[in-house]
Image: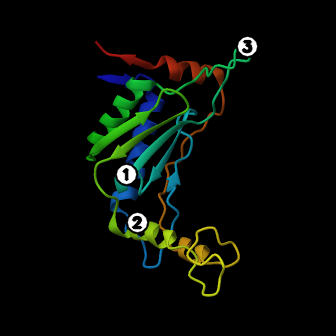
Amino acid sequence: MNFPTNPVAIGDTREVLDVGLRWLYETEQRPGAMDHHHGTRSPVVAGMRIFTFTPVGYAGLPVIVYDVARPVFDDSNGMLINPLGGHDERVWLISVINDLGRKTAISWNGDGITGSIGLGEPAHPTLRAAISLYAQGCPTRKCPMRRSTLCSKHQWFTPGNAQMRYPKWPDLLDPGPRPELVDAYVAGWKVAG
């Protein structure tokens, strides 16, 4: 099994995934709630990762996108110093998601700044309805942008978005861009024999 050895990264990542998955699958949204299709983002985890929970993505199913929170590049060659953990990180994240009781269907990227994991079950029906309501766009008659999500003239999004129930993220200590944490996090990915 591939896993990170940094205990802060293990605990905080698991907690953020748990909160995000509960939002996707267990949080009932109020009638009239509306949210854009990009979903919601976690706080920075262990100074290194940000997770985005997208309710409707690949094949109409939720996607978890994980990103390097603060990319660090080598000044001499422009190469990324703190990339994602590639296959090892992806396999570990999938195992945590599965341990939390959720199925995964597909994963992609994860070797540079961003990676994605497609989940195997649809999000909560009320969350999907909130996304669908957003996709219908501005409902104002005689609006040249009617049925477009790009209308900024009418306040069609704000009232529905105010009805959304978003995750209550844990209070994570974000140590900021400390080189020793970057080194410890990157060195923490290993393959157990």
**Which of pointers 2 and 1 indicates the residue nearer the eye?**
2
Residue 3 image offset from top left, x and y in percent: 36, 24
User: To which quarter of the image does residue 113 belong?
Assistant: top right
Q: Which mark is residue 21?
A: 1
Q: Nearer the viewer, residue 174 or 190?
A: 190
- How far apart, in angstroms, are the residues tagged by discs 2 and 3? 46 Å
Question: Residue 95, relative to residue 169: is it above or below?
Answer: above
Give how far across and how far down residue 82 sits, in percent. Answer: 58, 23
Counting residues from the N terminus, which is met first, the one under dot 1 or under dot 3? Answer: 1
Three-letter residue code for mark 3: Ser
What colouring method underlies this structural image?
rainbow
SS assignment at label 2? helix
Alpha carbon distance from label 1 to label 3: 40 Å
Furthest residue to the right? 75
Of 67 and 14, nearer the camera is: 67
Pick whichever of labels 2 and 3 is earlier in the sequence.
3
- Distance CA(mark 2)–CA(mark 1): 12 Å
* Few, some or many residues within 10 Å of mark 3 (<14, 14–19, 20+): few
- The C terminus sits in image quarter: top left
The residue identified by callout 3 is 76
| Amino acid carrying mark 1 in the image | Leu
**Do callouts 2 and 1 mark residues in contact (Cβ within 8 Å)?**
no
Pointer 1 local density, CA inside 10 Å: few below 14, some 14–19, many at least 20: many
What element does badge 1 sit on? helix
Assess disc 2: are there few (<14), some (14-19) or many (≥20) residues with their C-alpha within 10 Å of its C-alpha.
many
Say which residue appears at 40% left-offset and 66% top-offset: 127
- Which mark is drawn over residue 127? 2
Residue drawn at the location 53% of the way across and 63% of the way down: 36
Quadrant of the rendering where the N terminus is positioned: top left
Say which amino acid is labelled 2.
Leu
Q: Nearer the viewer, residue 143 or 38?
A: 143
**Residue 7: horizontal and vertical position, in percent?**
44, 27
